[in-house]
Structure formats: C-alpha cells, structure tokens
Image (cartoon, coloured by chain):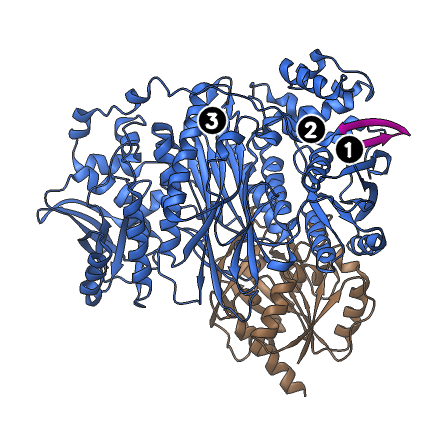
Chain colours: A blue, B brown
Amino acid sequence: MSHLVPDLQVSTSQMAKGLGLSGEEFEWIEKKLGRKPNFAELGIFSAMFSEHCSYKSSRKYLKRFPTQGKRVLQGPGENAGILDIGGGWAVAFKMESHNHPSFIEPHQGAATGVGGILRDIFTMGARPIALMDSLCFGSPKNDKTASLVKGVVKGIGDYGNSVGVPTVAGQTFFHACYNQNPLVNAFALGIVKKDEIFKGYASGIGNCLVYAGAKTGRDGVHGATMSSKEFSSDEELERPTVQVGDPFTEKLVLEATLEVMRAGLIVGIQDMGAAGLTSSSFEMAARANTGLEIDLDKVPTREKSMSAYELLLSESQERMLLVCTPEKLSRVQDIYAKWDLHAEQIGVVTVGHSVRMSKDGKQVVDLPVEVVTEPPRAERTMMAPSDLKQRWFIDRNRLLSGSIESKFDRHMEAFNFANPTSLVEQFDSMVGNRTEGGTFDDAAVLRLRDIPEKPMRIAMTVDGNPRVTWLWPLEGGKRAVAEAAINLALKGVDPIGITDCLNFASPENPEVMWQFSETIEGISLACEALGLPVISGNVSFYNETDGKPIYPSPMIGMVGISEGRSKLAHTQFHSTALELALIGSPEGGLGGSLFCSQWLQRDCGQPEETDLKSIIRMLNFLSKLRSKRFDYSCHDISDGGLIHSVLEMAFFSRFDCIGAEISIPQETDVDGFLFGESIPRIVLGFDSAEATEVEMLANQAGVKFTPIGIVNDKGTFVLKQGGAKVLEKQMAHLKESWNNRWRCFF
Amino acid sequence: MKAGVITFPGSNCDDDCRYSLEKSAGFEVQSIWHKESYLPPELDLIVLPGGFSYGDYLRTGAMAAVSPIMAAVKEYAEKGGLVLGICNGFQILCEAGLLPGALVKNQSYGFVCRDVVLEIASSNPWTQPLTQGTFLSLPVAHGEGRYVIEPPQCQELEEKGQILFRYKENINGSTQQIAGITNRGKNVCGMMPHPERASDLRSHDGLKIWNAIGAILRERK
C-alpha cells in the first residue's frame, strides 16, 4: 500500500499515476520544481490536483457565473459566500456534495458531509442556524436503495441533531440513474455580524500556525482523490478512505472557535476538509501571499508512527487550522482547553512563498505555494449528445390513448409522489427556536431572533430537476433557479442569492462537459435575469459507476429575506371553503414531465423553455398578493403537475373531510392542464370574497388568472370537463397510498 | 425571578432556553458552566437544557450527571429549589438519581421531531392551573425519550400525583405514555417536550409551563 513508501523516496511517473496524476501533470510538476517531488510531496500534488480540490476541468466554465451584487461581501473562493442582509448583519451559506463517501458508507458519508459544510460556515465566523439537504437515490426496486436511504438519513440526522443545527428543508428524488451513485448534497447557512467575518488568510510574518480540534488519524487518507474518479463496483476496497464523524467534537470545536473569534484572538482560519492539512495550509498561504514552516511532529495524532504522507492527507474530521499572533497564542489555547480540545502551534508564517515541512528533524516538504495551488487546467472537449433529439421524441399516439382515469391512476403511482414526513421527522427541524414553517413544502422560513432591533425573516430552498436537465441542460439550469425563486416568493420573501452543487458524470466524457457548460449557462441566464449572485458552490464530477453516468444534477440552494414578520401564506388548504385559481399558463409543457415518464415509461420530450420575463411577472404578482394581508394558500406546480400540487395542498391540510373539485377549462389540452410542468404556474386557494381582487392583481401583474374549481368538505377529489364529472376518487384512499409510499424505508 | 441555565459540553438547547426564559417568561437568566462547583446565589430556578451532553456516549445523560456542577444541583434540589430538566436535561436528572426511572431508545429506534399532544395527568404545580384531562401541544425532538419504570414505582408516581402529562399518541413506547414527571417533593421536574420551542413561535403552549413556574415562585415568596 502507498503509505509504506518512505516520505523522502524520489517519486516516479508510475507512482504518480498510481495516485491519480497524469503523465503530463507529473512532467509539469517536475519542470516547475526543477526536480522530481519526493513521495510526501507527490501526495500533496495528487490531492491538490484532484478535480475535487483544483476544479481543473470546471474552473473555466464557473467564471461564467454572475458573482457581483450590492449585497455580496464574499463571493466564491472562500469557505463560504457571504451576503449583507442589513442592520449590520450578514448570512454565510454554501452547499457541498458528499456523494462518493455516502455510497461506500452511507451513515458516515452523509454525517461527515454535514460536518464539513457546518465547518465551512463557522470558519467564516458565522453561527450555523440551518441545514438543508438534497438527496438522490436509485430506484426503489434496486437492492441497495433501501439501505442507502436508511443510512444517509440516519447519518444526516445523527450529525445535525447532535450539533444542534436544525435541518429545515430538503428534497428527495428517486431515479434509476442513481442506482450505483446516490447524491448527498448538504447546504448550511449561518449568521454573522458584518464586522466579525473571518477568512482563510495566513497573514503576518512570524505569526503562529495553530492546529485545533480533534486529533489526526489515518481515516480518510486520500478522500479527495477518491472523489475525483469513477467507481468500480468493488468499492469495498475504498472503505478506509471514508472519514468518521464525531458530532460531539464538532459542537465543541464550533463553540470554542466562535469564542476565540469573538474574543478577537485570531488573524485567519480554515477548516481541514478535503485533503486535510495539505489544502488548508497551502490555500491559506496562497491567499495571504506568504510562506509557512510546519513541524509535522507537533500535529496531535491518535495513531502511532504516522508518516508525513499520512499526516498531510488524512481527512480526520473536526479539525481547524488557524493563525494568531504569538502573544495571543496562550489565550487561544485556554479557550480550546475550556472546551476540552487541543490547540497546538505547529508552525509559523514566513516570508517567501514556499511551504516547508519537517518530520523527525528532516525536511520532507519544500514546495512553492503557487505550483501546488495553481495546477494546469485540464482542457476538456465538449459535444452535444448525439441522441439528444431522440430523447425529445414523444409517442403522440400513445399519449392520446387512454382515459383520464387510467392516466390519473398511473400518475398516482409515481414513487416520488410521497409524504416525506417519515423521513423529515428524523431531523430536528426546530432546534435554535427560529423555524417558523415550511419544513415539508416549498421553502423553509426562519425568523432571525438574533437582531432584536430588526425583525426579519429568512427563507431557503433547494431545487433541481435532473430529468429536465438530462433532456435539456440549459433549461434544467434555468428552471432550477427560477423554480427556487418562486418557492421563496410563495413564502413572502425576496431571493438574494444562490449557492449550487453541480453533480455530473466524468468530465473526460465530452457529452458530460457539454451538459456541464450548458447547465452553467442556464443557471447564469436565470441569475442575471433575476439579479441573483452565485456566492459559493461545489462541483462533483465522476458520478458514475462502471461507466453508467448519472443524469446531470445541478442543485440550487437559494436564500431570501423579508423585513418584518407579517402572516405567512399557507401551503396547505387553510379552509374547507375556498375558490381555486391557476395563476400562469392554463397548459403546462409535458416535455420532461413526470407524467411522460409514468405514462410512456420513458423520460422524454423537449422541456418547454422557461420565459424568464414571465418569472419576473409572477414574482411581482406574489409580492403584490403578500401586501394584501388576506389569508390564502398557494403552492407551485412543478414535478407532478397541477394534480400533485392540488393533492399535496389537500393532504397537508388539517381537515380530514377536505375535498376538491377541479374543472378542466374549455379549449385546453387536458394532459397539459393536469400534468404539465413548465413554469411559472401556481395554484392559489382563497375566499370567494377575494376573487375579484385576486383577479385584478393578476391582470395588473400581467399573469393569467384561470378559475379552476373549489375546495370543499366532501372528502372526494373530482375532475369535471364541460360540466360533467369525468373522475371521482376518495381523498382518504389517495392520501393513504401517498402516506405509505416511503414507509418501506423506515 | 432569576434562573440559571447549565451548559454541558454538547448541550444545544441552552441558548433557546435562555432566550425563551428572558423574552417570554420574564426571568433574568444566568448561564452556568458544567465545570463550576458552586451555583450563583439567589437562583429561583435551575434549568438543565436539551442537547446531546457528551455526545450521548456511554448512556444519555450518564456523564453529565457526574459533572462538578451536579453536586451543587443535588444540594439545591434537596433544599427544595426548583429544578427543570428538558429532554437531555430530563435524562441527566434520571441518571443523577433526582428523578425515578430511566429514558431509553425510542421503540422505533429512530429520532422523532414533531408537535405532540399531551394530556395533563394530574393537578400538579408545574402545569397549574391546567386540570387533569386537558391538553397541551408541545414539540418533541429525541431519539431516546422512552420513559421506563418498574410497575410498583410507576404506581407510586400515579398515586402521588407525580405524573405531569402523557403523550396522547405513544410516540416512543414510554411506560403508560409518560412524557413528564416530578419528584416526590414536586420541586424537581423532567419532561421530554420542549416548552422553550413553543413560547413565542409555533404554539404558545410552552408559555403555560413558564407561567406555572412563575406561579410556584410567587406562592413561595
């Protein structure tokens, strides 16, 4: 095994290849250094040149993102992005993937994903107040799916619940393309006073470099490299590269770190995440344009005789690297000791731009910072999938055959149409005493009790539609952003920025690179139209196993704020006597819809292009509606079309007798009306006394208003066409199957 | 009124308790670190908050129960002082022997976070003026909240009016659906539901617990 090679042994291109470096990269390193790196140094390069750390394939494309804006205090490039929310306060947020570790060991993989994203937030000086997750699993028929769901959900819960950060929202999606490669994306948000933000700078010549938190073990050695290659099914061999999380230690590290920050004791800080001590030290030196001298013998370890190679590449969790002036060192150590944690000086900030490290009295690493942190870019070729147009083919004959009832019944069987309660209840969604609602629906809403003089709300949501993105990446990117914005507006808040997690297959596949680039274009177009900066994010490539790629899966985490705390709109029907209207186009596009997948047994069709101007009109309408102060329920129409939206509003209502009667508008395509998924379309329930005013508001905002029926207390779901009843179902029966669908996992 | 909220390593509802006691219950709140050996003077109430003290390692509450501060808490309780343990705080009070019984893993083996309906089981100072048979709605969030106790002891709890409330739906498999109890002297109380999460957000039923504590203190003075 690799760790048996002595640190100082001169490496060869063969050894480099074994650690995932290409021949060209090895030659480039040798040329830059004027010598061959030794084995410990080779380990550094292999981690830092991995896709996960270097963004070598993606960096060029990520530049397309709009990252500027009047609220932006920190854009991409730090541990998390930060936006100004006024009143002297700011929010830090980011989303990150932990896909590969979660497939190998679901519980620890997901748990440490949560741990890592929390550290990214408090590293910036922000107290984490909310978590979200986006989870994609394989088909329920797949043998592995149930154990992965159980493990991942337990892992997220065990970690977040214990640290005391609520998991307030999320999305879960099942599809066969994730059979061998689930996606676990974790989002975290923290709040910080604008003048108490910290960054990852190793500044000030002569300052102390301090290691704080848990001790280093051999777990997770080379995790970053593992995440940057495809899997073969014998993933068992990779188990030692999965880190083990300890939320108890994380909680202590969190409190101690915020305490040293608030006491003004440190200059810069970074957590030891992927590629552990290596990436944190080199990146901190690179940002500050300084050098570092590190004595590896000072690193607290929990295993004996670890080599420099192992110390550098361990991904043991709950560790921080920080810089302080020598006179403040003892106070820093006192605070960590109060929380029963180590804080050891392991080095100093030096002049020059090299990182030097010694072990057992010998120098084992001497590398110029920029050679390590600015690897050569990987030039990837791009090509649109040759079968893209075939994917757009819809079998019209089959679509026209079948009764409304047979289509409805099939639509109800969709595995993704399910009550998420059995999953969501395993997460503490309320700790912190800020969660106002939305945990189960469009977006979570939190009050900010931290700014007493300024009552505020913050809302967040995570969105993405891999099926649409597979069919049309540009539209997939656009739609994820637009849908997230509407979800926030439904909760009465204005979106202020996004983070993203871009999950794709191998960048060495030109079709994947095309998907990647098109998706980024789509996200950027939507962000520009809506004035939203991208402030942080993460790229996860190589999501494929045995050559089977996942669908391109961009996940968008969006955050919004509102001043004051007026009454929240309902998602569920808040009364058994409501009028229902559809806001937006009466017909939705069927391309890429769940309906096509269910009825035609194939993901197909060209998704309808999202008109960003119509999104802005819808956001305006929702903002006007909010100012009217009457009670209404509203829910967007997305995955599953109008049918699923109306039923969800009924199922979540507190009335057992709830019923709904929907009339299909005349001269409207029935399938498009009931099952179409293009956006923006919204279901709105209101008291009949308000009908005229709602219609007027819609007209003013330039959005279509179509009355579609009523909510009643008859306990049935009825569809009418031309006044005649074409379908009648017992609400209780529909709800029962929706309730039980995911029970099989828990 | 002055309350002390103890922070153990791994406590995570300490801040929520402080906030709620100050903003909703009108207490002046003092934070107390678990390594202290003495309590601050003139406390009217000590709260052991929820969380995962010592990561729930060994057994929930077992390590926190032997923290230096717990000797002082025991002495305070023996003198009749009011002590409230919420969630992990309840677990610690059982481990410390201040309350009978024990809290073990939920019957489902899973964590459960939701609003639950509680039925008042007896007329007890901690829930006054609510009477037996009335209902409260409070959130729970725990993985080890299944209250277990031997039948004779349970009967004693019942007879002495020490059972505070019961879950309407038994969410965790607790003996007799017990969600909260007091000691014999009724000055030490443990409950799995979180009143601090329902005093100015979600429901306001948490306030009813704070108000009852306020009433006990007024009666005493």
Residue annotated with mark 2: A372
Relative to residue A137, is residue B88 drawn left or right?
right
Q: Decide which of tag 2 and tag 3 comes sooner along the chain.
A: 3
Instruction: Say what amino acid the circle numbered 3 marks.
Output: Asn
Task: Tell me the number on the disc at residue A179.
Answer: 3
Choose between A317 and A738: the one closer to the eye: A317
Q: Decide which of tag 2 and tag 1 comes sooner along the chain.
A: 1
Residue drawn at x 83%, y 52% is: A329
Residue drawn at x 36%, y 45% is: A529
Q: Which residues are magenta?
A: A355-367
Instruction: Say what amino acid the circle numbered 2 marks.
Output: Val
Task: Farthest residue to the bottom: give it.
Answer: B221
Q: Residues within 10 Å of mark 2 (few under 14, many from 20)?
A: many
**Which secondary structure lies at badge 1?**
strand
- Seen in the picture, residue A22 relative to A723 is either above or below; the reply is above
Q: Main secondary structure of the magenta part?
A: strand
* Label 3: chain letter: A
Choose between A737 and A265: the one closer to the eye: A265
Q: Position of residue A683 (x, y in %)?
A: 27, 52
Q: Which one is in front in this view, the residue at disc 2 or the one at disc 3?
A: 2
**Which secondary structure lies at badge 2?**
helix
- Seen in the picture, residue A112 relative to B129 is either above or below; the reply is above
Name the image quarter holding residue A194: bottom right
* CA–CA distance in space, label 2 to label 1: 10 Å
Residue drawn at x 78%, y 40% is: A215
Question: Do labels 2 and 1 touch, CB within 8 Å?
Answer: yes
Residue drawn at x 76%, y 28% is: A367
Task: Farthest residue to the right: give it.
Answer: A361
Q: Position of residue A563 (x, y in %)?
A: 44, 65
* CA–CA distance in space, label 1 to label 3: 43 Å
